[in-house]
Amino acid sequence: MNWSTWALLAAVIIGVYLSQLAGRLDRLHIRVDRAEAALRAQLLRRASEAIELAAMDGPLDPAARITIDGFAHAARDFGETDLEKDHRAQRLEQAGRNEAEGELTKALQAALPDEQSVMEYAAIGGGSELMEELDSTTRRVELAKGFHADAVAQCQKMRRRAIVRFLHLQGRAPWPEFIDINLAQPTGFAHRSR
Amino acid sequence: MSESEVISAEGTDSSGPSPTHQFRRIGIVCPYSWDAPGGVQTHVRDLAHALIAKGYEVSVLAPGDDEPDEDFVVSAGRAIPIRYNGSVARLIFGPLSTQRVRRWIDEGHFDILHVHEPAAPSLSLVATWAAEGAIVGTFHTSNENSRMMSGTARILRSALEKLNGRISVSEYARETLREHIGFDSVIVPNGVDVAFYADAEPMTSTPVDAEVVTFLGRVDEPRKGFQVFAQAMPAIARERPEAVFYVAGPGDVDSALKLVPRSLHGRIHFMGRISDGQKAALLRRSNVFVAPNTGGESFGIILLEAMAAGACVVASDLEAFVKVLGDDGAGRLFPNEDFEALAREVIELLTDKAVRERIAHHGRDRAYSYDWNAVVNEVIEIYDTVYVPGEVVREDVGATALGRAKLWGRGESS
């Protein structure tokens, strides 16, 4: 084989490597997007269930009910991010929604801090079902946030590689960001998991 | 010997209309942290002092991280910082605080329960919900732009139905209440302790000929309007070489300084969070007091405090401020957020001593009509109308599922 054949072979190998790398990167971005969509879906469920909780004339004081109702509506009403809007507007909307979700987490925690508060809810009509749903939803919210963080970490690691940055393999995909909000499950549910 | 004789024998102030009924024990709920400064906290503190001076026994329940200084204050524990109504509020709610509120009501044997700002998701709302008896509520907020969820209004209405007497501190607070919840209320204005400010020793740390222009409030809370004041500073400093700017209130000083040209940094004094005593001394030394608030003010007690101290007030033309200043020249107004107009007013007042002193004089007169000594009698009249002799404020056991279960159990056993 002469040198030009070697060069061709090398070019093909490099080409295949790069296209595989670009493909991997693309898949990682898709995974981040999917993970975020999954988390948003769980959060939407959490907001709806929180609104139900607030509407119930149960053992919870009206101050807690109003707070939960307010933040749950705020979180829910940000709705789907409008892709027509520019990136900045989207970011702002996202920030507002994230803030509402974080405050909702705090309000739910204050409302359901221990086993007894959950049991008091379970004792009233319709309360038992709602507590089970909220237990499962808030746990899934935590899971979904973990999966998202995992995807973001991998994607960020890949994008930091010199070759990716040098050849701009990510194309126009935005830098993946962690969702840095407190989405912990209320401690009142802790006894139920496992 | 009757109750009133005991009170006057102790040398307390028993002026004002005498109540038709004898009620002594008053429980007051303050929704915001006792250790943080704020209009509602000041109102509650002054009201409590004024009631104690009239011979009543007062217990105040308030959230707070620190041990309260006053022996009549009971801490309801740590509050949760939550963004509410555009700013960070420290609220208290949830089963744990409910337990504390219940215990306080149970042990207090109050004749009257007086809750403040019960329409906010707060300790006051928790107390209203958890109590039963003679309950009075005072509404402080006026809210032009709050969006209230229909669910929220419904929850509030059913809780606030238990208020026997409703007080608003201003016409705007009254309108807000009527609009959002559909309840009417009696207006009793905020009180100010005029003597405390009028008799305070002026701060001595500034040169005698310095012209002190003062701002009070959070520097990083846009509704307090520090940014408007900051924009007005260069013009004032240029025209009045002796002018110095005093800024007192919590918030991030570094980012506040960024709003002001570097050349002026030497003429601004940030005092941070100050005590009421320091505030009185500062206001007494202030030639001009600026209140460039851009919104969210329901009453403007701080204006009255400045007026009581003899400072000349320049305020933005918020409705609440217009009302407090009245139309007899007790202060100057400028169009909201118009920093150039603010600068013009301040420069004029610093330049013309006669005008400044005339306004300050009118201001103090006006402050006297809001003195707590007068205002507290109006509050006592309302207590008097809702008080049922022989009845104390009790826990409302129907308010929780557990309570309902107890009632149920009782029903079955009887």
Image (cartoon, coloured by chain):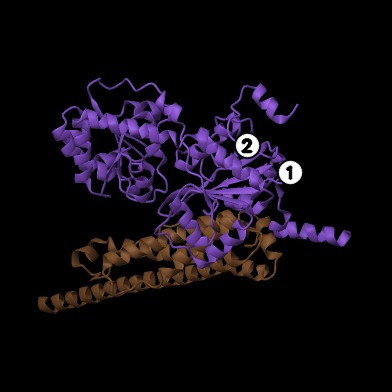
Q: Position of residue B174 (x, y in %)?
A: 48, 54
**Pointer 1 residue:** B389
Q: Residue at x 31, y 67 (%)?
A: A90
Q: Nearer the viewer, residue B18 or B298?
A: B18
Q: Is residue A52 left or right of residue B413?
A: left
Quarter of the picture containing the N terminus of chain A is bottom left
**Pointer 2 residue:** B59
Chain letter for brown, please: A
The answer to which of marks 2 and 1 sits earlier in the sequence is: 2
Q: Nearer the viewer, residue A153 or B227?
A: B227
Secondary structure beneath label 1? loop
Chain letter for purple, please: B
Depth check, mark 2 against mark 1: the one in front is 1
Q: Residue at x 51, y 38 (%)?
A: B375
Q: Is residue B105 left or right of residue A136?
A: right
Residue B150, placed above or below residue B276: below
- Cα distance in 3D space between marks 2 and 1: 20 Å
Residue B23 occupies which quadrant of the picture? top right
